[in-house]
């Protein structure tokens, strides 16, 4: 799976408020594949200037190579660690659910992020 992610964060004291969107390609062992896109809001707490813990929530859209598509709600939690002046490492658990079909799933993502 490969994603392109863009977002913005605003801090006030130790509080972090953010918005991020992504577009990605995915495949699994079934051999299904497709793309996904979504947008999440983040609410976090800066433990140190280099570490933030956060909760996230939003919506995701998924399309398969066979033409099926679905919209999901997402909830997550994660941690982001600064590793250089403009690079961070992010680990996030995300739960997603489709309210109309009750299909749900969980994922664990790790990302290397470049800030500019």
Image: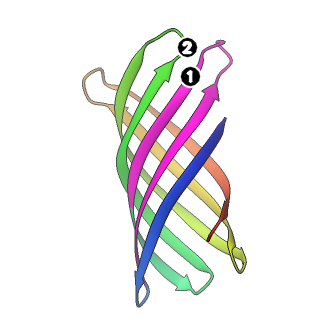
Residue extending furthest left?
A: 100
Q: For marks 1 and 2, give the CA distance.
A: 5 Å
Queried whether the magenta region covers residue 34, the answer comes back as yes
Location of residue 97 by image quarter: top left
Q: In which quarter of the image is the C terminus?
A: bottom right
Q: Earlier in the sequence, mark 1 or mark 2?
A: 1
Residue extending furthest front?
A: 116
Residue 30 point in image, percent of width and height:
64, 12
Residue extending furthest right?
A: 84
User: Disc 1 marks which residue?
Assistant: 34
Q: Is residue 55 left or right of residue 92?
A: left
Q: Is residue 110 above or below residue 98?
A: below
Location of residue 45 by image quarter: bottom left
Tag on residue 44?
none
Q: Is the magenta stretch mostly helix, strand or loop?
A: strand
Residue 73 point in image, percent of width and height:
33, 40
Q: Which residue is drawn at 36% across and 53% down?
A: 57
Queried whether the magenta region covers residue 42, the answer comes back as no
Q: Which residue is drawn at 65% across and 22% down?
A: 28
Q: Is residue 83 above or below residue 26?
A: below
Disc 1 is placed on an element classified as: strand
| For the residues bearing labels 1 and 2, Cβ distance under 8 angstroms | yes
Q: Which residue is drawn at 53% across and 61% down?
A: 78
Q: In this view, does 78 lie above or below 49?
A: above
Tell me which segment is drawn in magenta: 15-41
Disc 2 is placed on an element classified as: loop
Tag on residue 65?
2
Residue 102 point in image, percent of width and height:
31, 25
What colour scheme governs how the chains and residues are painted in the rendered image of this protein? rainbow
């Amino acid at each position: 799976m490969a994603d392109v992610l863009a977002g913005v964060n605003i801090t006030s004291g130790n509080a972090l408020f953010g918005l991020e969107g992504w577009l990605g390609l995915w495949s699994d062992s079934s051999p299904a594949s497709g793309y996904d896109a979504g947008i999440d809001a983040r609410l976090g707490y800066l433990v140190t200037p280099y570490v933030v813990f956060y909760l996230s929530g939003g919506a995701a859209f998924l399309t398969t190579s066979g033409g099926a598509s679905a919209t999901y709600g997402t909830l997550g939690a994660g941690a982001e660690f600064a590793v250089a002046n403009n690079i961070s490492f992010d680990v996030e658990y995300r739960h997603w659910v489709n309210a109309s079909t009750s299909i749900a799933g969980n994922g664990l993502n790790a990302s290397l992020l470049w800030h500019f």
